[in-house]
Image (cartoon, grey):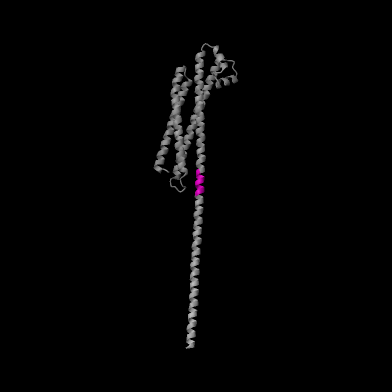
Amino acid sequence: MVVSLAQFLEDTSSVEQSIKTIHSNIDRIQTLQNQILGSTSLQQESSYGDERNELLVNTKNLLFQIKDRIRKIETENARLPASDSNITVRKQRSEFIHEKFTSVLEEYRHVQDSYIKQQKDRMSRQYRVVNPDASQQEIEDYLSNPSGQPFQQALVRTDKAKDAMAYVKQRHSDIKLIEQTIAELATLFHEMQLQVEVQDDIIVEIDSTMEKTTKKLEMGGNLLTDATISAKAARKKKWMTTGIVAAVILVIVIIIIIIRKSSA
């Protein structure tokens, strides 16, 4: 069932407001992540991280809700007949919120990409402090597996091995969490692109159905016209036949009258 224009505008305004909430969440997430990067203690870093993680979950849920709402709106629009007086307004409005949503997805991904890069740079510097002669390959191995034996052995040579290991584990877990968020954003973005293709297919299907219906109506009209012409021709033949029969009868009557008069 397609909702009224008033309800449609209310729904899209609600979606737009939710997108603004996403923007606010992203700004706060970015602020918290900058504070995480600048933290000087594990406790401080954990405190910022807990607030940030809660925002990540809330933002993720809201993103998926918005995606589903936009899909519903676009599906309804795709099923509107081309003759609908509000179709232009509806399509322009739905395209607007679709673009705003994909834009906020890109913004969020950019923020998280930047954070991961900074966090990895931070861990790389930390590793070089522990092992100044480390090669780039060693650093990359460390970033992928900071709990590996080479780093453990390097930590043994330091006085703060325990604290360093705690930092490493926390930051590595943090990176994995954000990488998961980025993967989810990529999936959402891909689904939004697919939605556009699906709506295009629906529109093509509807146009095709309408074209077939129009052709059938035209064929029906042609058949009706042919039937009308045939009926007129039949009626004309009927009257011609009746006229001929009447003329023949009249001739016969005249002949009979003439014969009778001659006999008399």
Q: Is residue 91 visible?
A: no
Q: Is residue 202 above or below residue 26?
A: below
Residue 90 place in picture, x, y as percent = 44, 42
Q: Is residue 241 above or below residue 55?
A: below
Apparent side of residue 138 relative to residue 166 in the rendered image (left or right) = right
Q: Is residue 185 above or below residue 126?
A: below
Q: Residue at x 50, y 17 (%)?
A: 167
Residue 88 place in picture, x, y as percent = 45, 44
Q: Is residue 195 magenta?
A: no
Residue 74 place in picture, x, y as percent = 46, 40
Identify which residue, 52 or 31, lies in the foreground. 52
Q: Is residue 202 visible?
A: yes
Q: Quadrant of the N terminus?
A: top left
Residue 21 place in picture, x, y as percent = 42, 31
* Prevailing secondary structure class for the magenta stretch in the rendered image: helix
Q: Residue at x 45, y 39 (%)?
A: 72
Q: Residue at x 48, y 77 (%)?
A: 249
Q: Residue at x 45, y 20 (%)?
A: 46
Q: Is residue 207 magenta?
A: yes
Q: Is residue 178 above or below residue 87?
A: above
Magenta residues (range): 202-209
Identify which residue, 145 or 19, lies in the foreground. 145
Identify which residue, 152 or 128, lies in the foreground. 152
Q: How many marks?
A: 0
